[in-house]
Image (spheres, helix red, strand yellow):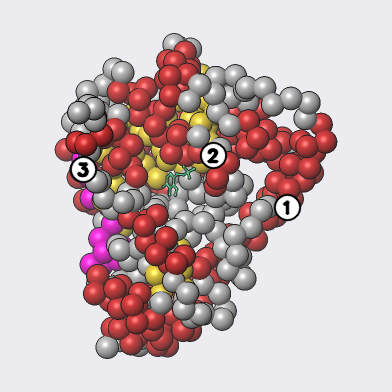
Amino acid sequence: MVFDPFDRYDITPPDPIFFISSQAAADQRPEKVDLTIGIYKTAELKSMVFKSIREAEKKLLENETNKDYLSISGHQALIDGSIDLVFGKDHCERAICGIQALGGTGALCLGANLLAETLKMPVYVSKPTWVNHHNVFSSAGFMVKDYFYYDQKTQSLNIDAFFEALNRAEKGSVVVLHGCCHNPSGADPDLEQWKEISDLCKARQLIPFFDLAYQGFGQGLEQDVRAIRLFAKDGHSMLVAQSFSKNLGLYGERVGTLLVLTSEKSGVISHLKAIARASYSNPPRHGGLIAAHVLSDPHLRSIWEDELNYMRQRVNSTREHLADALAKSCPNHDFSYLKERNGMFCYLDLTKDHIESLKTEKAIYLTQSGRINVTGLNEQNVVYVADSIASVLE
Ligand SMILES: Cc1ncc(COP(=O)(O)O)c(C=O)c1O
C-alpha cells in the first residue's frame, strides 16, 4: 500500500461569502438580485475597470521592458502613495514601515504574523466582523476574541459595550478596528467616540490594528482616515492594512499595503520581508505598478478621485432609495437606519428564514447574516426587492 498523507483531511466548511455568491452566480432566474459579495457594481449591475486604471495599464504596456520580480517589500512608489493616502502628505515624523501586500487580506496576514513573533496576547475583533478576520488571526496562532460592537436587534452601534470590552481586554492585546465603512454593519463610530477608543487603547496598552478596505467609500478619501490620523497623532504604535481592491477596483490583482507606525526606526521591515519571502517571495508586479501610477500621476489621480466620488454617491443614493422603497413596502418596519450607514454594506433586519425565503422564492441573494452589498441594487430592481422583503415579512 502506498502511504497516502491525504486520507486524513476532513472537508472544511466553504467560505460563507464566496459560497453564497457562487450560488447566486449559478441561479438563472431572470429576476435574480445578487447582494452578496463585496464587489462594486455599476448602475447596470456590472463589474467595472476604472478609467484611470485602464490608462495606467496602457502606459505600462507601452513602456514596460521586463517582467522582473519586484523587490521583496514591493514597489516603493505604491508604498509612498499609500502612506500619503493614509497619513497625509505632512505626516508625523514617526517612522512608518511599509510593505506591499497581496490585497488587504495579505496585509492583515503580514501584520498578524509579525505580531505573532513577539506577542502571545489575544486579538480582539468586532462582533460582528468580516468573517475572514477570525481565519487570518487564528491561522497566525492567536486566540481571537470578540468585542461587542453592533446590535442587530436594535440595528445600532453599541458603543458602551464596545468601551466596556476594551476596558476589560488584557493589556498588550491587539484590537482590530475598521478604519471606515465597518463590514458588515456599515456603522462607524463618530470622531468623539474614536477619541475615546484611542484613549482607552492607550490606557489599556492595546495595539490598534486598522483594517482599511474601503477608503473613499464612506465620506471621502480624507474623511475616511480621520480615525487613523487621530490615533497617529495620539502617539499609538499601530498597524494599518490598506486594500486597493475596492477603491481602485483591483480585486483580482491583489494590491494592498501594510503600514506599521512605530516609535523609532526598528527592525520591523526586515521581519516583514522575511515573512513575505517565506510565503510568496515578492508581491504581484502588474497591480502594484498600475496602482502606484494612478496614485502618483496628477492627471490619473484626478480621474480616479472623480470616479471614486461618483461611486460613493451611487452607494449613498442607492442605500437611500432602498430605505425609501422599504418605508413604502413595509410601513410596519423601520428601515430608516439604512440612511445612516457608510459604504457598500449594511444589514437588513431579517431572520434566517426570511433570507432563505428571499433566495428560494424571489431569487434575491443576501449573505447568511443579512448583510447586503447595496450596489447590487439599481432603479430597476430596488422596488422588487422592497416588495419581496415585505412579502416575506408578512
Ligand atoms: C473588512 C475587510 N477587510 C479586508 C478585506 C480584504 O480585502 P482584499 O480583497 O484586498 O484582500 C475585505 C474584503 O472584502 C474586507 O471587507
Read off the residue under disc 2.
254
Q: Which mark is residue 69?
A: none
Residue on which disc 3 sits = 10
Residue range of the region highlighted in magenta in the rendering: 145-156
Quick check: is the Cβ at mark 2 less than 8 Å away from ligand 1?
yes
Pick the quarter of the image with the N terminus. Answer: top left
Between label 2 and label 1, give the one nearer the viewer. Answer: 2
Are there few (<14), some (14-19), or many (20+) residues within 10 Å of tag 2?
many
Occupied quadrant, residue 197: top left
Please state which amino acid type lies under the numbered disc 1. Answer: Lys
Q: Residue at x 44, y 15 (%)?
A: 274
- Element on which disc 1 rests: helix
Amino acid under disc 2: Arg
Circle 2 — which element? Answer: loop
- Earlier sequence position, callout 1 versus callout 3: 3
* Mark 1 or 3: the one toward you: 3
Location of residue 44 (image quadrant)? bottom right
